[in-house]
């Protein structure tokens, strides 16, 4: 019977939960619009004689710039300025920015309801960036990309006569307030609190971590800490966003109502907020998700920056699970129900990053503690789950790698079956 087969009582409960929650957070307003011109907030990067400046336009900005509500058509202009100080010519590979980018004619046709098609065609053609950048020259203009609501990962690839240049960006979309905006990773730890570890030191540290996150009461075990990502913040975000993961919004009255609406009416809400869970005494530093057509069903992961570094790279400790529906909860009134086979969500992330071609190494470490189908463990909202007790450790690569080039570390071995003898979980350190 589809989504209308859900218990009828869940719907009014969701609305009531929204009223109860908003009563506690009504003082948190929606984010203020960034009033700067998009050229004033460009991000710049250089690579061997080439400089790229880039900015993504928000919905209001694109309508102001072009006179048409492009965001409502799923179109998001990205502005670039390319400076070539080399003696060779470069060609901008538009597919690296968006493999499904829109041509100026397509955008003009989509915008025609706001004016004459011929006028829009001239406007979008004039604004489109030239793809050839001659030696000792500078070019600027727009690429018309598909809409990303929260953050946009952009790879700018320039093909030269002798060699190439590749620069990566993760761009915030104006008007979007993400969980990770609350945290400046440079201020989380004092220099003396950070330590560099070698490969075996990393393994030992990861195996010493608590089994699980802590729930909203900061005391009760929640979902297992079953994932580790090694890579600097920009590379980590770029890799996930390129694979279709969305940053989650902060919890505010407007995002609560949007979440309830998505659940009630089956509309897609790619950036719906997630509840805070706790590691290292704080809520997640980054939250990402892949939602289906409704927020009731999504893969979501939370990441915390650890106080260790490996090979001068950040180490992110995480929790990944799959939401498969909604239910009542004595802890949070209404909550998501997770897929009890949490190892499947862990496997999904591994495959997803391998498919991205930016996965360098994979290893597994102990520390979660196994739980069988016959004797499951329970998360903070009393959902059962079972696991082989391992956490996946995924090392990101600076350059693309094939599946065959991924290195598999000879650490803990995956068991052949899930229904295994229960091992005690690691003790929490608070």
Image (cartoon, helix red, strand yellow):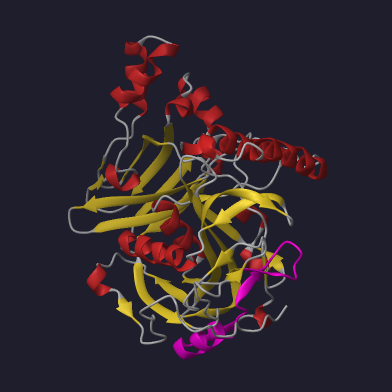
What residue appears at the point 71 percent right and 42 percent down from the top-left corner? 252
Above or below, 261 against 245 in this view is above
On the image, the x and y values in percent for residue 81 come to 40, 42
Seen from this angle, which residue lies furthest left? 161
Please state which of residues 394 and 346 is positioned toward the viewer in this rendering: 346
**Displayed quadrant of residue 110:** top left
Is residue 31 located in the magenta-colored stretch of the structure? no
Above or below, 192 against 235 in this view is below
Seen from this angle, which residue lies furthest top? 116
The span picked out in magenta is 195-222
Left or right of 350? Residue 60 is: right
Is residue 202 located in the magenta-colored stretch of the structure? yes
What residue appears at the point 67 percent right and 50 percent down from the top-left corner? 328
Rendered-image quadrant of the C terminus: bottom right
Please state which of residues 183 and 331 is positioned toward the viewer in this rendering: 331
Above or below, 13 against 196 in this view is above
Please state which of residues 301 and 331 is positioned toward the viewer in this rendering: 331
Residue 32 visible in the shown view: no
Above or below, 101 against 395 in this view is above
On the image, the x and y values in percent for residue 259 come to 61, 40
Residue 21 visible in the shown view: yes
**Displayed quadrant of residue 214:** bottom right
């Amino acid at each position: 019977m589809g989504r209308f087969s859900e218990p009828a009582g869940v719907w009014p409960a969701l609305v009531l939960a929204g009223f109860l929650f908003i009563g506690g957070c009504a003082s948190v307003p929606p984010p203020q619009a960034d009033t700067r011109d998009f050229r004033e907030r460009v991000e710049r990067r250089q690579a061997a004689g080439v400089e790229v400046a880039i900015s993504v336009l928000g919905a209001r900005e694109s309508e102001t710039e072009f006179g048409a509500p492009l965001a409502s058509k799923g179109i998001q202009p990205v502005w670039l300025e390319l400076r070539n100080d080399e003696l060779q010519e470069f060609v901008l590979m538009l597919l690296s920015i968006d493999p499904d980018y829109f041509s100026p004619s397509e955008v003009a046709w989509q915008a025609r309801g706001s004016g004459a098609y011929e006028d829009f065609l001239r406007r979008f053609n004039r604004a489109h960036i030239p793809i050839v950048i001659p030696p000792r020259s500078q070019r600027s203009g727009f690429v018309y990309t598909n809409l990303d609501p929260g953050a946009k990962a952009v790879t700018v690839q320039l093909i030269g006569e002798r060699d190439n240049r590749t620069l990566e960006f993760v761009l915030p979309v104006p008007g979007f307030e993400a969980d990770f905006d609350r945290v400046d990773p440079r201020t989380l730890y004092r220099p003396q609190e950070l330590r560099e570890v070698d490969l075996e030191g990393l393994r030992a540290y990861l195996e010493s971590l608590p089994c699980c996150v802590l729930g909203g009461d900061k005391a009760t075990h929640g979902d297992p800490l079953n994932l580790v990502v090694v890579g600097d913040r920009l590379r980590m975000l770029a890799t996930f966003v390129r694979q279709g993961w969305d940053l989650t919004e902060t919890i505010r009255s407007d995002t609560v109502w949007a979440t309830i609406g998505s659940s009630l009416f089956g509309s897609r809400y790619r950036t719906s907020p997630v509840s805070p869970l706790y590691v290292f005494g704080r809520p997640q530093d980054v939250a990402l998700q892949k939602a289906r057509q409704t927020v009731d069903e999504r893969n979501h992961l939370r990441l915390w920056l650890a106080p260790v570094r490996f090979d001068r790279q950040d180490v992110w400790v995480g929790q990944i699970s799959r939401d498969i529906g909604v239910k009542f909860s004595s802890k949070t009134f209404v909550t998501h129900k997770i897929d009890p086979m949490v190892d499947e969500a862990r496997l999904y992330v591994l495959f997803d990053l391998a498919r991205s071609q930016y996965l360098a190494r994979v290893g597994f470490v102990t520390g979660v503690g196994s739980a069988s189908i016959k004797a499951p463990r329970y998360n903070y909202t009393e959902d059962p789950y079972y696991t082989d007790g391992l956490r996946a450790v995924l090392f990101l690569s600076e350059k693309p790698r094939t599946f065959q080039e991924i290195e598999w570390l000879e650490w803990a071995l995956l068991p052949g079956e899930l229904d295994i003898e229960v091992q005690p979980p690691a003790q929490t350190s608070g």
